[in-house]
Amino acid sequence: MFTSTASAEPLEFGIYEESRSNIRRLKESLPEDQVAGLAREVIRRLASRHSKVEHISHEPTVAELEELCTALISDNDTAAAAIIFGARAEGAPPEAIYLKYLAAAARMLGDWWNEDRADFVQVTVGTGRMFAIMRGMKHLFVPAFDAPEKSAIFASVPGEDHTFGIRMAADLFRKDGWEISLKIGLDHDELVADIERTPSSILGLSLAGRHSVDALSRLVVALHICCPHAPLLVSGRDVEDAEPLLGLMGVDCIARDLDEAREHMRVLWEKNQTG
């Protein structure tokens, strides 16, 4: 999925605060059922990663996890981030923070939700802070591949039947010299798993209309967790109408037409090559 570097700051609090603010505004803009869906997506994606990292020896105690979960749902916006910052400062590697602390906390918070130890509002606050912490750690992770040729994944949002536009875009970018892996017709879990297995530095997602924003938001959350360093570009029909929400989701670039997509892709690729 990714490799890490220990040379950077433990947590970029500026990015954490910006992400936390964006998530709060996003929740205010979405119906409650969609907010609950995003919270479940964060818990499910993070919790599923905990069982895959037995090789990481640094693991928090149950008491430390309970302290972290309590901080995540508390009235203090920075308490949980401070715990993570402290663990990193004491030598916990990024993989342990991401896959042991946060993944295990997601499982515990999910249990608290199911057992009514935490209510809907608390859990959505907690998952939002977890997501913001991950965004604040993005700089610690670098791609685990080194593609010599320009490459990207183009994918349609799950549930979309109108794929002519993304097929045409893939063909045009191939003519421009890009190696494009096109993924269409996959459901949410299939698409996330397929993208995670496919080495590529840029993810181009096709939005067929505002009706796809719910599916897109779940996809973006999942990709931020599974592919934390990969930049996300969104283009498609009515993308201007959805632009405010897309910005709050943490999408890196929004392209209104093919020329904008080409320019964004060029910049993202050059940035990737220079690190």
Image (cartoon, helix red, strand yellow):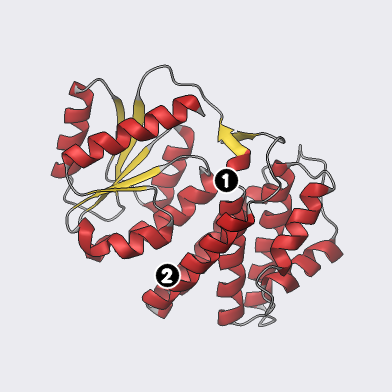
Q: Residue at x 67, y 62 (%)?
A: 107
For the residue pair 250 and 182, the one nearer the viewer reads as 250
Q: Position of residue 205 (x, y in %)?
A: 31, 46
Q: Position of residue 227 (x, y in %)?
A: 51, 42
Q: Amino acid at mark 1?
A: Lys
**In which quarter of the view is residue 82 placed?**
bottom right
Q: Is residue 200 visible?
A: no
Q: Amino acid at mark 2?
A: Leu
Mark 2, secondary structure of its residue: helix
Left or right of 66? Residue 23 is left
Q: Which comes sooner in the sequence, label 1 or label 2?
A: 2
Q: Residue at x 71, y 35 (%)?
A: 7
- Figure check: 273 above or below 233: above
- Figure check: 80 above or below 252: below
Residue named by callout 1: 138
For the residue pair 270 and 49, the one nearer the viewer reads as 270
- Figure check: 156 above or below 211: above
Give the alpha-carbon distance from disc 1 to disc 2, as whole Å. 20 Å
**In which quarter of the view is residue 239 placed?**
bottom left
* Label 2 crowd bin: few (<14), some (14–19), many (20+), radius 10 Å: some
Q: Position of residue 97 (x, y in %)?
A: 72, 49
How many discs mark residues in the rendered view?
2
Q: Residue furthest front?
A: 14
Mark 1, secondary structure of its residue: helix
* Label 1 crowd bin: few (<14), some (14–19), many (20+), radius 10 Å: many
Q: Which mark is residue 179?
A: none
Q: Position of residue 253 (x, y in %)?
A: 34, 47
Q: Is residue 126 visible?
A: yes
Q: Residue at x 57, y 60 (%)?
A: 132
Q: Residue at x 37, y 59 (%)?
A: 247
- Figure check: 229 above or below 254: above
Residue named by callout 2: 26
